[in-house]
Amino acid sequence: MLTFDWVTSDHHFSHARIIEFCDRPFSSVGHMNGELIRRWNSVVGPTDTVLHLGDLNLGPFDQSLALTMALNGDRVLMPGNHDRVSTATNKPAYVETFRKRYESAGWTVVDEIVDVEVSGQRRLLASHYPYRGDSRKDVERYAGHRPVDTGLPLLHGHTHSKEATRPGSREFHVGVDAHDFTPVHVSVIEAWLDTLP
């Protein structure tokens, strides 16, 4: 079972159009990249473990991946649909080729759905995708890669929502768009879990 100190997703390093698509408060892709790195390093220590739930980089691959080498901590990537190691969008041989490139940039690549543990006893799931899609097309496109809802709480990204949770939901959105472009500390997840029935 995987443990972590911080969790986050959907940085989209070097993806200029994400500023427009998600109404991000950055004047350019360079400004966004710099702020994403600064905000990460302002909270994550060198020995902290960060679980990244996908869509790490989407600009020119080598350039955008190289940027992530400046990020503090032990970095674990759970692939999202825009990552070159995603089995939802890429063939196995392609995934293996790119896995080595992510690893050479300091990332540990894990499965697309993982059991995680907080407080040494609270089990939940983590996935790039929520249990259900944010559109009908999205549900159909990634149906085989979404976690199955068996009642466990879920950490996810993908939606680019500005909200972390919805009332009564067992899903917590960890994407940067909902958290001031900064990773979420495990204590926030623990507090959220304490509110669930």
Image (tube, grey):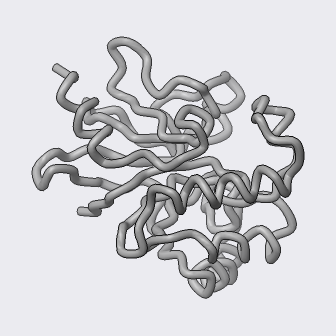
Residue 145 pos. (x, y %): 53, 47
Q: Is residue 44 left or right of residue 190?
A: right
Residue 88 pos. (x, y %): 63, 54
Q: Residue furthest top?
A: 167
Work out whether 162 lies above or below 35: above
* Image quadrant assignment for residue 158: top right
Q: Is residue 170 left or right of residue 28?
A: left
Residue 11 pos. (x, y %): 66, 51
At horizontal 58% and vertical 53% (from top left) the residue drawn is: 39
Work out whether 62 lies above or below 12: below
Return the residue nearer the eye: 47 or 87: 47
Residue 32 pos. (x, y %): 77, 50
Work out whether 78 lies above or below 46: above
* Image quadrant assignment for residue 90: bottom right
At horizontal 30% and vertical 48% (from top left) the residue drawn is: 186
Work out whether 15 lies above or below 61: above
Q: Is residue 98 left or right of residue 26?
A: left
